[in-house]
Image (cartoon, grey):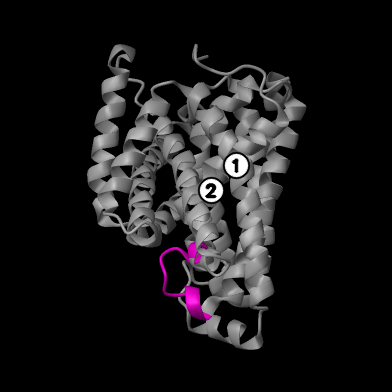
């Protein structure tokens, strides 16, 4: 176990960290909710319900297996659940995606500075890169603390803005009809929901796996996964209705939730832009920490240089643009994550007693 590892994590801290790991630029901006749920009209609600159940199930499995293995990095869970050969492929997919998603978060910060503060996106990308670097240097305890502080403010702000968006523009039949002209992230709502959970858990496993051994008890893992999944489901549902009720206006913007926030007042718009930047930060540090922790072949004495080089490389890659990364990178990795899902289900079906006995 890493000397920086936090001890005795509570259910609420596990839940907050789980949520914070996932609610990055794509989620909090409303862009992911638009592409993976709202684009399917009324069927998007079924997709959200399915995603919530899967977030609980697989989040709990990852935490429990991580606890049983006393995991210090996600690779241990991946190799255990998927074996040496397939596990190596999934490990490669996750490692590449952690880097790509870090670049997406840095790009998302640039988009916020460009659209909301009318400043060069370089200010946002450089600031996000520096903040992420300085946080990850502190180890996993710094990462978990940073994430868990952001989550309550983020969820409350998202809910308030979403409720206002729905109140201002109740959903009409025309809104639902308009979704038929939108192109979602997958052929149908079922695949979209599966894909959404898959690529998000590919990110979250980097933090969930080493959290398992540090929980107060096995029961804390269950409630932490449940509260985390319900928090995610509630946030997605509120944003789904807000985006759908304003679909004609937000379908073509990069950050739908900031547009909806602007309907309240310029101050709320500015406040949400800051909250969104914090959400981007929470996922960026998760991705950077997960990527660096995987590089076990690098001597710990050179860890800080690895963090710096990774951050610089992600900064360069971020110039591809936020929307393009969400549109093409995320779904592609989501499909690859299905293999990881299958492995988790397999070991839970056939090795459940061993896992639970070891996790006690």
**Residue placed under numbered mark 1 in the picture:** 151
Q: Position of residue 142 (x, y in %)?
A: 49, 24
State the CA–CA distance, disc 1 to disc 2: 8 Å
Which residue sits at x=39%, y=40%?
98
Side (left or right) of 340 relative to 59: left
Of the numbered discs in the image, which one, if any, rests on residue 326? none
Q: Nearer the viewer, mark 1 or mark 2?
A: 1
Q: Position of residue 281 (x, y in %)?
A: 44, 41
| Mark 2 residue crowding within 10 angstroms, few (<14) / some (14–19) / many (20+) | many
Q: Position of residue 218 (x, y in %)?
A: 73, 25
Q: Quadrant of the C terminus?
A: top right
Which residue sits at x=61%, y=66%?
240
Please indicate, yes or no, whether residue 74 appears anywhere in the rendered image.
yes
Chain part drawn in magenta: 248-258
Side (left or right) of 81 relative to 85: right
Which residue sits at x=65%, y=32%?
14
Please indicate, yes or no, whether residue 80 appears anywhere in the rendered image.
no
Q: Are marks 1 and 2 in contact (CB under 8 Å)?
A: yes
**Residue placed under numbered mark 2 in the picture:** 23
Whether residue 74 is situated above or below residue 38 in the rendered picture = above
């Amino acid at each position: 176990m890493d000397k920086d590892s936090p001890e005795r994590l509570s259910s609420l801290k596990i839940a907050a960290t789980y949520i914070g790991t996932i609610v990055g630029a794509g989620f909090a901006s409303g862009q992911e909710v638009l592409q993976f749920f709202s684009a399917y009209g009324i069927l998007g609600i079924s997709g959200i319900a399915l995603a919530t159940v899967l977030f609980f199930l697989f989040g709990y499995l990852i935490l429990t297996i991580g606890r049983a293995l006393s995991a210090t990095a996600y690779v241990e869970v991946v190799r255990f659940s998927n074996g040496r050969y397939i596990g190596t492929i999934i490990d490669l997919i996750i490692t590449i995606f952690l880097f790509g998603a870090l670049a997406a978060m840095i790009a998302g910060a640039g988009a916020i500075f460009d659209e909301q503060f009318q400043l060069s996106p370089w200010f946002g990308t450089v600031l996000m890169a520096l903040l992420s670097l300085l946080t990850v240097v502190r180890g996993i305890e710094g990462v978990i603390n940073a994430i868990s502080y952001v989550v309550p403010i983020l969820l409350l702000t998202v809910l308030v803005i979403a409720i206002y968006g729905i109140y201002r523009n109740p959903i009409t039949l025309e809104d639902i009809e308009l979704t038929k002209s939108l192109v979602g992230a997958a052929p149908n709502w079922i695949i979209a929901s599966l894909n959404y959970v898959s690529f998000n858990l590919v990110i979250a496993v980097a933090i969930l796996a080493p959290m398992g051994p540090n929980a107060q008890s096995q029961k804390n893992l269950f409630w932490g996964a449940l509260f985390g999944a319900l928090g995610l489901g509630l946030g997605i549902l509120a944003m789904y209705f807000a985006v759908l009720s304003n679909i004609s206006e937000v379908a073509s913007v990069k950050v739908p939730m900031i547009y909806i926030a602007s309907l309240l007042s310029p101050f709320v718009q500015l406040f949400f832009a800051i909250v969104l930047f914090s959400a981007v930060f929470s996922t960026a540090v998760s991705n950077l920490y997960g990527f660096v922790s995987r590089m076990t072949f690098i001597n710990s004495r050179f860890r800080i240089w690895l963090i710096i080089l990774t951050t610089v490389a992600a900064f360069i890659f971020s110039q591809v643009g936020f929307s393009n990364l969400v549109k093409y990178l995320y779904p592609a990795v989501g499909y690859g994550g299905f293999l990881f899902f299958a492995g988790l289900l397999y070991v839970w079906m056939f090795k459940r007693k061993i896992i639970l006995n070891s996790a006690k």
